[in-house]
Image: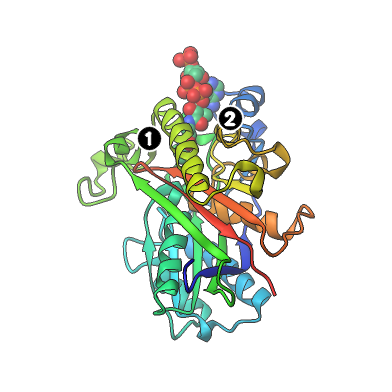
């Protein structure tokens, strides 16, 4: 058993008010409510739009998290923002958040791992807490993915939405609880199937790159779908096995919300009952790095789920890169 672990002390979130419904999309591209609901489970998503930036959502999510815990911003040691849509190329959104919330004693950075961004950030922060270098970390997933979506491409525009979720991680007062284990992977050979080609150092913005629509998300949905189902299921089965658990032992399964069919296929492989699977994709679509913390927020604070000390939660994600992983949490509360 690890001598020191990190536990989730508090959660926060931000969702833009503007809703983009399936019927709105029917007016924009050749699609239908029936197709979107049956192929993805999504009914509506939130849109922040260009202008305010990623930090506009990350900051209120972080503030809510701190307020719920009664922790002051100056008590935070570390801020990690999982995002693929930072406010700007640099400085990092973590720096902007640090300044905006007044976390004057924190260091931190942005972490780019697509839809796995939150799990990668959580695991990184947890290890820094385990090492004893950090006592308290804000881990935020925030993406304004709508700024990278081509609203003429029906293959991508129906899926994605904006949002932010945050957790406050702290050193767990009791051993045997908190983030017990994680398994993370990447396979860069899948990069071409889900990417934004332009805007980096390879294709800096030019009139030509704009004309070629290279600053938008491109996706080969079928390739990503197959890899996501296999990746999330394999890694989730493995983490349960190596911790001596089965799907029955889980109180909650909190999967990345990319497609209801991916969630169902993964839950089936894990043998987890439907009622234990946290699903909010119908309301928000795929919010990239915000997806898991938004689902966790609802699991902890809404839906009368009543988490108890000792409950096992499994989180799992798959995203651009390819990146994927699972993290096993044993709930701690005083
Ligand atoms: O978070 C990680 C990143 N992303 C994902 O995990 C997404 C993974 N992939 C998916 O969720 C699914 O592949 C999609 C939802 C993107 C697409 O669903 P699909 O069932 O895999 O559709 P498909 O790409 O195989 O396309 C089937 C048909 C095609 O028409 P044809 O060629 O059979 O005539 C598409 O053109 O559906 C068509 N289609 C649509 N039709 C209506 C694709 N998008 C739409 C649409 N409305 N929005």
Q: Residue at x 41, y 48 (%)?
A: 114
Q: Quadrant of the C terminus?
A: bottom right
* Quarter where residue 222 is shown: top left
Farthest-out residue, left = 202
Q: Is residue 154 visible?
A: no
Badge 2 residue CB within 8 Å of ligand 1 = yes
Q: Residue at x 62, y 51 (%)?
A: 295
Q: Measured from the top left, where is residue 129 in percent x and y? A: 45, 74
Q: Is residue 333 above or below residue 199?
A: below
* Frontmost residue, 299 versus 94: 299
Q: Measured from the top left, where is residue 206 in percent x and y? A: 24, 46
* Frontmost residue, 108 versus 267: 267
**In this rendering, position of residue 270 left or right of residue 124:** right
**Which numbered mark, 1 or 2, is in the foreground of this view?**
2
Label 2 sits on residue: 261
Q: Residue at x 69, y 59 (%)?
A: 300
Image label count: 2
Secondary element at image label 1 = strand
Badge 1 residue CB within 8 Å of ligand 1 = no
Q: Residue at x 67, y 57 (%)?
A: 311
Label 1 sits on residue: 218
Q: Is residue 174 above or below residue 208?
A: below
- Rounded to the nearest angstrom, the CA distance separating label 1 from label 2 is 21 Å
* Frontmost residue, 284 versus 53: 284
**In this rendering, position of residue 81 left or right of residue 167:** left
- Mark 1 vs mark 2: which is more N-terminal? 1
Q: Measured from the top left, where is residue 227 in percent x and y? A: 41, 32
């Amino acid at each position: 058993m690890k001598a020191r672990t990190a536990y989730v002390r508090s959660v926060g979130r931000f969702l833009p008010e503007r809703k983009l419904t399936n019927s709105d999309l029917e007016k924009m591209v050749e699609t239908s409510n029936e197709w979107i609901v049956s192929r993805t489970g999504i009914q509506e998503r939130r849109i922040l739009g260009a202008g305010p930036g990623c930090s506009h959502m990350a900051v209120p999510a972080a503030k809510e998290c701190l307020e719920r815990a009664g922790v002051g911003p100056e008590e935070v040691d570390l801020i990690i923002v999982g995002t693929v849509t930072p406010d700007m190329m640099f400085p990092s959104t973590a720096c902007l958040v640090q300044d905006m919330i007044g976390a004057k004693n924190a260091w931190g950075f942005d972490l780019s791992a697509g839809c796995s961004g939150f799990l990668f950030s959580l695991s990184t922060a947890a290890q820094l807490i385990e090492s004893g270098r950090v006592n308290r970390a804000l881990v935020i997933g925030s993406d304004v993915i709508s700024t990278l979506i081509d609203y003429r491409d029906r293959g991508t525009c129906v899926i994605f939405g904006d949002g932010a979720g945050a957790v406050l991680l702290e050193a767990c007062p009791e051993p045997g609880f908190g983030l017990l284990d994680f398994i993370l992977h990447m396979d860069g050979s899948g990069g071409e199937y889900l990417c934004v080609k332009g805007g980096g150092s390879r294709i800096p913005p030019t009139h030509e790159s704009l004309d070629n629509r290279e600053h938008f998300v491109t996706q080969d949905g079928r390739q990503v779908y197959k890899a996501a189902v296999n990746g999330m299921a394999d890694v989730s089965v493995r983490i349960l096995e190596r911790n001596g658990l089965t799907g029955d032992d889980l109180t909650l399964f909190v999967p990345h919300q990319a497609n209801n069919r991916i969630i169902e296929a993964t839950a089936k492989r894990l043998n987890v009952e439907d009622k234990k699977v946290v699903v909010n994709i119908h309301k928000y679509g795929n919010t990239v790095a915000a997806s898991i913390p938004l689902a966790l927020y609802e699991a902890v604070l809404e839906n009368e789920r009543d988490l108890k000390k000792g409950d096992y939660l499994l989180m799992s994600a798959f995203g651009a890169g390819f990146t994927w992983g699972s993290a096993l949490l044993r709930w701690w509360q005083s």
